[in-house]
Amino acid sequence: MTDRNHKLSLSRQAELLGISRGSLYYEPRPTSDADLKLMRRIDELHMEYPFAGSRMMKGLLRQEGFTAGRLHVATCMKIMGIEALYRRPNTSKPAPGHKIYPYLLRKLAVTRPNQVRAMDITYIPMARGFVYLVAVLDWFSRKVLAWRLSVSLETAPCLEALNETIRRFGKPEIMNSDQGSQFTSFDFIKALKNADIQISMDGKGAWRDNVFVGRLWRSIKYEEVYLRAYNSVSVARDSLARYLTFYNTRRPHSSLDGQTPDQAYHIKPRQVHTRREKRLSRPRSSARGASIPSPSPIGFCRSAMVYGTSSRQKMSGWNFWVSAVAGRQTCCRRRMPESLPIWRPAWNCLMT
């Protein structure tokens, strides 16, 4: 950008470029061993106490013998790309020039693979230095579909991982991410729109919106990263590749009933039933335990219970069935306390 042999002085070149003249003489220095040790411990404490900001983090480090001040701790946390997780006011303000999309997963039943995928970036410490790991996770099966290592927070690794998942596994219906500049960039948003993928973004500071990816980071760091000291990026890439293969193919997950992510990814999609459908399919028994056949043509009608403020008959909406006996309606009901809401039958939907 500047030329020391040019006829213009360096001061004039810096003035024309709009940069400080002092920056022309700056030589970057590698991160010191003390800062690398401090940043590694900050990352470990952040996994245990994600609510800790720079002030609390400084106190936790002081208890362990570190002498770094709050500003230095805040600088290290900024370099690592981590911050305390809590709700703050005015968090919906978008970044300049970048559009923030709404969160689409609230109250959404995720019932099959490739319905929703999530994407995020985390900090990976090494023996000397650090790298960033980006991963794409299938929300239903917890399977890691693609991942990349990068020495900087750029959009290119995110695009590479996104394109790999679409090429190998097809496109999802929804892609969820946080509001990081990599995921709100024009190139990343354009790739999602060209693939006709719905865009969902976490609320800022709302860590529960992408909790499954956060749980993945915890597993990777406690079961792999913190047990090793990577000497180079290539060593870190090979070791993480072995662990993620184990994570997908052999590691059982309690949330998947002991299955591996690969097994859950290829299973038949499960059916989601409403409460009424589950109750109608459940066998009914009498007080003595004898099975009671479904009365015809009415049967068990939960939808017949509507909320009311007054009625001569106080009954529970959970134990109610009607049978036709000699042309009359016979109700079996359980009385409710006077303090509870009163339910009354909607006779117009039953047999008259």
Image (spheres, grey):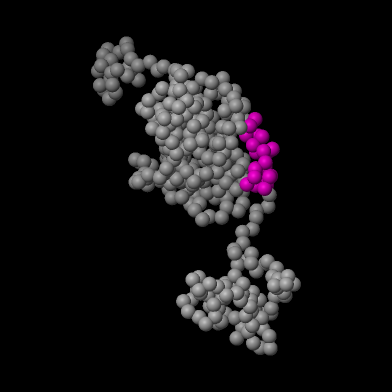
Closer to the camera in the image, 316 or 129: 316
Residue 206: quadrant of the picture: top left
**In the rendered view, would you say 176 is above or below 128?**
below
User: For the point 53% across and 72% down, which residue is it?
Assistant: 337
Residue 73: quadrant of the picture: top left
Closer to the camera in the image, 223 or 135: 223
Q: From which residue to which does the magenta span run?
A: 242-266
**Residue 152 seen by the camera:** no
View extreme (right): residue: 290
**Picture coordinates of residue 84, whole percent (x, y):** 43, 37
Q: How many marks?
A: 0
Closer to the camera in the image, 283 or 188: 283
**Picture coordinates of residue 316, whole percent (x, y):** 57, 73
Residue 225: within the magenta?
A: no
User: For the point 67% across and 48% down, which residue is it?
Assistant: 257
User: For the point 49% across and 53% down, which residue is it?
Assistant: 106
**Picture coordinates of residue 327, whole percent (x, y):** 66, 88
**In the rendered view, would you say 58 is above or below 32?**
below
Question: With 125 as the anchor, is 25 left or right in this view?
Answer: left
Question: With 133 as the anchor, is 84 left or right in this view?
Answer: left
User: For the point 67% across and 67% down, which residue is it?
Assistant: 281
Residue 249: within the magenta?
A: yes
Closer to the camera in the image, 348 or 179: 348
**In the rendered view, would you say 170 is above or below 111?**
above
Mainly helix, strand or loop, the magenta region?
helix
**Residue 256 seen by the camera:** yes
- Position of the C terminus, as image quadrant, is bottom right
